[in-house]
Image (cartoon, rainbow, N blue to C red):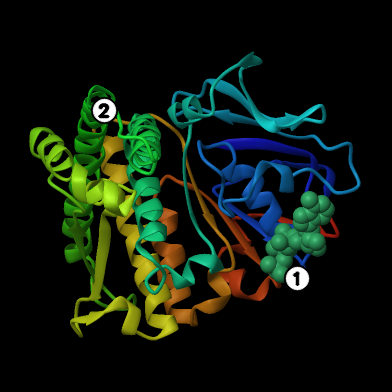
Amino acid sequence: MLDRILLSRFRNHRETAVEGTAQFNLLVGENGAGKTNILEAISLLAPGRGLRRAQLADLPAQDGDGGFAVNASLQTWKGEPVRLGTGSAAERPGRRLVQVNGGQASALSLGEWLSIGWLTPAMDRLFVEGAGARRRFLDRLVLAIVPGHAANAARLDNALRERNRLLSDERTPDPRWLDALELQIAEAGALVAAARAELVAQLQVELAALPEAPFARPSLAYLPGGPLEQDALAAALREGRARERAAQRTLTGPHRDDLAVTMAGKDQPAADCSTGEQKAMLIAITLAHSRLLETAHALDADSRPRLLLLDEVAAHLDPLRRQALFDRLRTGSAQVWLTGTELAPFEAIAGEAAVWEVSAGTVRRLP
Ligand SMILES: Nc1ncnc2c1ncn2[C@@H]1O[C@H](COP(=O)(O)OP(=O)(O)OP(=O)(O)O)[C@@H](O)[C@H]1O
């Protein structure tokens, strides 16, 4: 678990240390105090752009020197200490720096040390937004289980970007270039699609085992955006060249995948459900995912510590659902970080939680 995190010149935090953590960690304070900023800093200890998907340039404190740092120490399951750090230097603001145990490392390698999941208010629109947000959501869930997924997804993205560039070029693309790129897309794409499909199938099993109450039970289906098999995907890309040149982009492949979510009892698409029902389904997916991770851990297939960041989740649940959420989290092994504007919704766990009052970019540990 995460023992300590230090935010330096990060958003509205000049120098904020959060230490003395527990299984439940509560960040409580008024709107705009900097609670989500702390969760965001933690989320940057994973590959990717963090829970706000912010640009690197937005992260340094506006009144700072243009750089920022987030440093954390954590314990692996075996109790070994690990130090992770990320940030950017004032002189090279566009470049993300990552350190593991004091040595330079790649952002992708962060996934080998920690598995981080989150739920934020921005995700309330997940089911009504475009498929891109759901693909990213799915990829984060996969990444929490399969650290190598980020590298495959990055390889797929790079090859697709390059192929789209060639397709939209006025000059006729060199077919050998297209051959090479399509091979990369097919190789990485088949791995990405297989990992997504596998995760959805596993989640579906977990979800089916969940009681329908108190959380709305969602039913998931993976909708592939192209053939799943590597050879079939390569063939589809080759055959689609003329059509895709006209469209100036690649029209088939895992970059067109989607996740269909319906509410099991009502058989209603998630997008048509109430806001509260959508939130309850997201929580159910998060809890089912946690159970998958527990299993992976129990099988010794995954030894990374796990963090779950729940931004403003508790306050939006009625007391029964809130209690059910806390009960489930308590029996899990993830370290949980929760935010709220007041302590009242956390009454049931306040005794066992570490609590910080966050105010204008500072924190104070409450006794
Ligand atoms: N780069 C930055 N430099 C300085 N301050 C920033 C920067 N980015 C964001 N902020 C400030 O951080 C504050 C928002 O912090 P945050 O979103 O963590 O609040 P919060 O405590 O989660 O609030 P809420 O309860 O409303 O969600 C705002 O006041 C915003 O102006």
Which of pointers 1 and 2 lies earlier in the amino acid sequence? Answer: 1
| Point 48% across, 82% down: residue | 318
Q: In this figure, which residue is indicated by the disc labeled 2?
A: 184
| Type of amino acid at the residue the image marks with label 2 | Gln
Q: Residue furthest top?
A: 103
| Type of amino acid at the residue the image marks with label 1 | Asn
From this view, report whether residue 362 is shown above or below residue 82: below
Q: Is residue 100 visible?
A: yes
Quadrant of the rendering where the C terminus is positioned: bottom right
Query: Is ligand 1 within 8 Å of the beta carbon of the residue shown at mark 2?
Result: no
Q: Is residue 364 visible?
A: no
In this rendering, the label closer to the viewer, 1 or 2: 2
Query: Is ligand 1 within 8 Å of the beta carbon of the residue shown at mark 1?
Result: yes
Q: In this figure, which residue is indicated by the disc labeled 1?
A: 31
| Point 23% across, 27% down: residue | 175
From this view, report whether residue 39 is shown above or below residue 209: above
| Point 33% across, 39% down: residue | 145
Name the spot of residue 117 as percent of width and height, x first.
Answer: 46, 49
Decide: few, some or many residues near mark 2? Use Cα within 10 Å; few <14, some 14-19, many ≥20: many
From this view, report whether residue 304 is shown above or below residue 259: above
| Point 50% across, 24% down: residue | 79
Residue placed most toward the observer, 259 or 356 = 259
Marks 1 and 2, Cα distance to the nearest angstrom? Answer: 46 Å
Name the spot of residue 130 as percent of width and height, x first.
Answer: 39, 66
